[in-house]
């Protein structure tokens, strides 16, 4: 099993990020205020952006020059990054065998919407599709950026059980959430973000409270 080691600096406009942490197999929750560097860190790990300095390693491999499509990870960004002209089934078919497509859609509760395009889905359904696509290749590293923020509580718990199952099978999972209950339910370890700095911890402190309205599904 491989660890993810992040030791990266990046500047975007007036914001500077200095991210330093190690994520072991299991769920590492990234927790902190909005605009504190969580999404930027995921983009650096995914290879969508390159750090100004430092390094990102997964196992024995330094990812400095490894393009995103060769990193073998699953990524569900905040906006989903869905393909507007492809139906639900076609979001998964490039990555898995045909018989696995419907199995994955059933796992996230989208089997009845296989022929719909993203504009025909609710916000929560679009999030579940982005999550299913991230899972499709059974990656050893999953990056999940507020993946269930538009889901109702029951669906959120169900999707959380899938995350935990992947963690139990040895995946390294970086999970961004603003929901403390979700963070404590899913997390094995935590990276606290504040003003572009990171702190590793095994539990959330009592003063780490972040809340914001949850949209309806």
Image (cartoon, grey):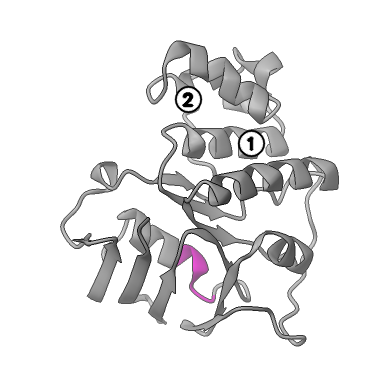
Q: Main secondary structure of the magenta part?
A: helix
Residue at the image position 28 percent from the left and 67 percent from the top:
56
The quarter of the image holding the N terminus is bottom left
Q: Residue 83: x percent and y percent?
A: 46, 29
Question: What secondary structure is marked by label 1?
Answer: helix
Quadrant hosting residue 190: bottom right
Residue at the image position 61 percent from the left and 23 percent from the top:
105
Which residues, given as a range, are shown in magenta?
A: 36-40
Label 2 crowding class (10 Å Cα cut-off): few <14, some 14-19, many 20+? many
| Disc assigned to residue 91 | 2
| Front one among 147 and 5 | 5
Residue 98 is left or right of residue 122, and the answer is: left
What residue did someone put label 1 on? 128
Task: Look at the picture and state if 88 lies above or below 176.
Answer: above
39 inside magenta stretch: yes
Q: Residue 171: x percent and y percent?
A: 47, 50
Residue 137 is left or right of residue 8, and the answer is: right
Q: Specify whether residue 87 is in view.
A: no
Per the model, the C-alpha gap separating discs 1 and 2 is 12 Å
Q: Residue 146: x percent and y percent?
A: 62, 55
Image marks 1 and 2: residues in contact by CB distance under 8 Å: no
Q: Earlier in the sequence, mark 1 or mark 2?
A: 2
Question: What secondary structure is marked by label 2?
Answer: helix
| Front one among 17 and 93 | 93
Q: Residue 176: x percent and y percent?
A: 58, 61
162 inside magenta stretch: no
Residue at the image position 60 percent from the left and 78 percent from the top:
202
């Amino acid at each position: 099993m491989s660890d993810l080691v992040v030791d990266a600096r990046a500047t975007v406009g007036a914001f500077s990020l200095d991210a330093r942490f190690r994520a072991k197999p299991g769920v590492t929750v990234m927790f902190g205020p909005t605009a504190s560097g969580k999404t930027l860190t995921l983009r650096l790990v995914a290879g969508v952006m390159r750090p100004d300095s430092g390094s990102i390693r997964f196992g024995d491999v330094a990812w400095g020059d490894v393009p995103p499509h060769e990193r073998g990870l699953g990524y569900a960004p905040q906006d989903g990054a869905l393909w507007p002209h492809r139906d639900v089934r076609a979001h998964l078919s490039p990555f898995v065998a045909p018989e696995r497509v419907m199995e994955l859609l059933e796992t996230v509760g989208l089997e009845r919407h296989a022929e719909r395009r993203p504009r025909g889905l609710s916000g929560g359904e679009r999030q579940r599709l982005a999550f299913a696509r991230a899972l499709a290749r059974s990656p050893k590293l999953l990056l999940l950026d507020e993946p269930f923020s538009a889901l109702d509580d029951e669906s959120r718990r169900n999707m959380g059980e899938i995350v935990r199952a992947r963690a139990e099978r040895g995946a390294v999972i970086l999970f961004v959430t603003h929901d403390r209950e979700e963070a404590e339910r899913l997390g094995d370890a935590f990276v606290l973000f504040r003003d572009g700095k990171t702190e590793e911890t095994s539990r959330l402190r009592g003063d780490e409270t972040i809340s914001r309205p949850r949209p309806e599904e």
